[in-house]
Image: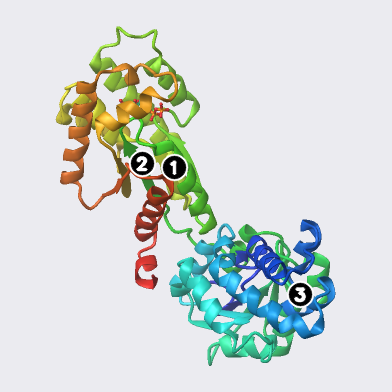
Amino acid sequence: MNTYPYDAVIFDLDGTLFDAEDGIVSSVKSAMEQMELEVPAEADLRKVVGPPLRDSFEHLLKVPVDRIDEAVKLYAVSFLEQGMFQYAVYPHIRHILQMLHESHVHVGLASTKPQGLCERILTYFGLAHFFDAIVGETNDRATLGKPELIRRALPERYELAAMVGDRCYDMEGAKAAGVEGVGVSYGCGGEQELQDAGATHIVPDTEALRALLCPGGDIPRGFFLTMEGLDGSGKTTQADLLEKSLRQFGFTILRTREPGGCDISEDIRHIILDTENMEMCASCEALLYAASRAQHVHQVIKPAVERGMVVLSDRFVDSSVAYQGGGRELGVDTVQQINAPAVMDMLPDATLYLAIDHTTALNRRLSASTPDRLELEDGEFYERVQKAYERLIRENKKRFMVVDAERDIESIQKDVLTATLNRLEPEFRREA
Ligand code: TYD
């Protein structure tokens, strides 16, 4: 049974669930440019975020009154084509919605955006399934008004409800609808505006919002995601891009790598990869990788997953199986045994494999940076590594997501993100 204070919580969209600034500003800019009107400086453009769009076009941007309909139309097209994809879910929001939803709190949305657009945005960001009611305006003119939107988003029966929003309209609407107003000062309104509008509570950030709405609630377990591939497969580039996208979707990310990821393990990394250490035997190498992994799991990976984070690790135990088990010919079983005490119960929830042939990988490496000790190995070594990876994939079909990495960066990036989102949040697939 939940002990949360509200049994119904209604959210505003822009500035509350989403950082909407870039998306709105770029769409306004595009509309102004298409109308061949003077586009104000970036700082002035940012003032359009918050007030109703028609008002902004008229008063802030000085669009002639007879051209406002045209401006709103062009804005809408541009917003659908690119603006909404520049939205970013604020950190912790995903957890808050999930925790409320799982505790059977009624979750609603009341936005002055058109209804269809609200649904589209929540669906694209994989949040729609947390909502019991999504209510927006019926067209682009705010005809229903905030109090009515809130009323429609509320359930038939509730004991104590709250409207969460970043603007005075949200707090005034809450009062008119007879529910508490929770003001979030991280959005467009700021503390003074929310206070003046009679907010019941004001929170400075989404962590405080979680504490207010879900006190004492357990944060859902995070996710352990690893990236694997031959040296030269473009792993690090793709990990950078994936990290950025996942943050935009509202996941709290901890990015790390192996060997390394914490001080002790980074020290071990240095010993392993140092080209001075050419006499290192295969067993020593395998044990050092495992030792560095043990500390990494204990100090970084496990605690972060328990805190609800998505841990994105550039390499993990599969690298040892492929490189030491296959490449160094120590054997898969031996390497898995060595690693058992290091990995404990922290096997990855999913693993991205960037598939590239070892000969292509070699050519890429030759034209890149100075090689480390492992990268000095010959073609046959990498052929064995590739074979070992391929066997791992065959034996762990459910865990591995294989992406063809012999293409351009954007195509790979798209596939990497889609595959990852489908695993992180199965609802993405359902909603797509
Ligand atoms: P990586 O950090 O991917 O190299 P780079 O920074 O050059 O992209 O990995 C370092 C090397 O260590 C790489 O050649 C793969 C190898 N390796 C193993 O042989 N076994 C392991 O368990 C791990 C984690 C890496």
The numbered mark, 2 or 3, whose residue comes first in the sequence reads 3
**Along the horizontal axis of the image, is 238 left or right of 57?**
left
Q: CA distance from mark 1 to mark 3?
A: 37 Å
Q: Which mark is residue 227?
A: 2
Please, what is the three-letter code of the amino acid marked with disc 3? Answer: Pro
What's the distance in space between the residues labelled 2 and 3, CA to CA? 43 Å
Disc 3 element: loop
Q: Which residue is mark 3?
A: 51
Q: Residue 169 appears at what percent x and percent y? A: 74, 79
**Mark 1 secondary-structure assignment:** helix
What mark, if any, has residue 180 been given in the picture?
none
First of labels 1, 3 by sequence position: 3
Please say if the residues under marks 1 and 3 sit with CB atoms less than 8 Å apart: no
SS class of the residue under badge 2?
A: strand
Using the image, determine if residue 387 lies above or below residue 411: above
Is 228 in front, or is 367? 367
Where residue 305 sits: x, y (%)? 43, 48
Res. 12 image quadrant: bottom right
- What percent of the width, then of the height, locates residue 51? 76, 75
Whether residue 198 can be seen here: no
- The residue nearer to you, when weighing 210 against 278, is 278
Q: For label 3, count other residues whose C-alpha is less than 10 Å away and answer few (under 14), some (14-19) or many (20+).
A: few
**Camera sees residue 150:** yes
Q: Quadrant of the N terminus?
A: bottom left
363 up-or-down from 42: above or below? above
Residue 239's disc is 1
Residue type marked 2: Met
Label 2–label 1 contact, CB within 8 A: yes
Which sits earlier in the primary sequence, circle 2 or circle 1? Answer: 2
Q: Position of residue 384 (x, y in %)?
A: 18, 27
